[in-house]
Structures are given as C-alpha cells and as structure tokens.
Amino acid sequence: MLFIGDSAKEKIEQLLRDESLEEDYFVRVAVTSGGCSGLSYKMDFDNTLQENDQIFEDKGLKIVTDLRSFLYLCNTTLEFSGGLNGKGFYFNNPNASRSCGCGESFAV
C-alpha cells in the first residue's frame, strides 16, 4: 500500500485545481536509479495507466506506481512540508536504510 499524508493531500488537491487538471488525473510515483544514495524518487501527475501499474487510493486520491518501484515504495507515505525548511514533497519510506541530506535519494 502507498499512503498520502494530510498535508500532501491538501497540496496535491491545490495543484490539481491550479493546473485545471481533470478528475481522471492521479499522482504517479516511481523510483529511478541515481542520486547520491543510489535511488531517486520521481513524482508527477498522469492520466494514463500502464501495464503492471499498482493502483492505490488513500484519502480520496489515487496514487499509482509501476511494479518495480512498488518493491521499494511499499508502505511509504507521501508527505508535504511547507515550513521554514521548505522541503516540499517528500517520501516517508520505511524501506530506506539511508537517505541523502537533501532527501532526494535513498538506498535500501
């Protein structure tokens, strides 16, 4: 399962409204090779499902990932921080054994 934190839900809904994206859009998250810790997160809006997509719904929002990425993201929560640190979106990933200082990449 993938989860969406309350702060991320509010920000995603705001971005969908600001971009005038239709109801069939969802959040697509993925893990790619790269970053200083070896793996990086990728997040975008999408409206096309791919073969082997894993589809989850939390707090009324749909979040989709490919099967390979799900192996790294299982039980991860997408969060948002707009505080003084200005982090933006970030992933609270219980599978990560370490992450870089900026939070953009991780290792398992």
Image (spheres, rainbow, N blue to C red):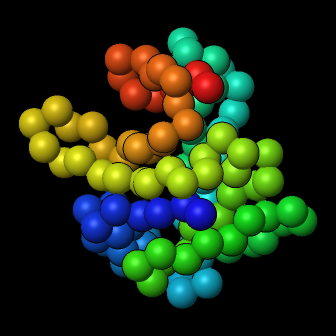
Q: Residue 34: give x, y in percent of width and height.
A: 65, 21
Which residue occupies 35% across, 17% down? Answer: 101
Q: Nearer the viewer, residue 17 or 1?
A: 1
Q: Quadrant of residue 53?
A: bottom right
Relative to 96, say whether 78 is above or below. Answer: below
Farthest-out residue, left:
84
Which residue occupies 36% across, 22% down? Answer: 102
Number of disc labels: 0
Q: Residue 6: give x, y in percent of width and height.
A: 28, 67
Relative to 32, say whether 52 is above or below. Answer: below
Farthest-out residue, top:
36
Q: Residue 21: give x, y in percent of width and height.
A: 50, 77
Q: Is residue 21 visible?
A: no
Q: Nearer the viewer, residue 66 or 92?
A: 92
Q: Quadrant of residue 31?
A: top right
Left or right: 32 in relation to 99: right
Relative to 58, say whether 104 is above or below. Answer: above
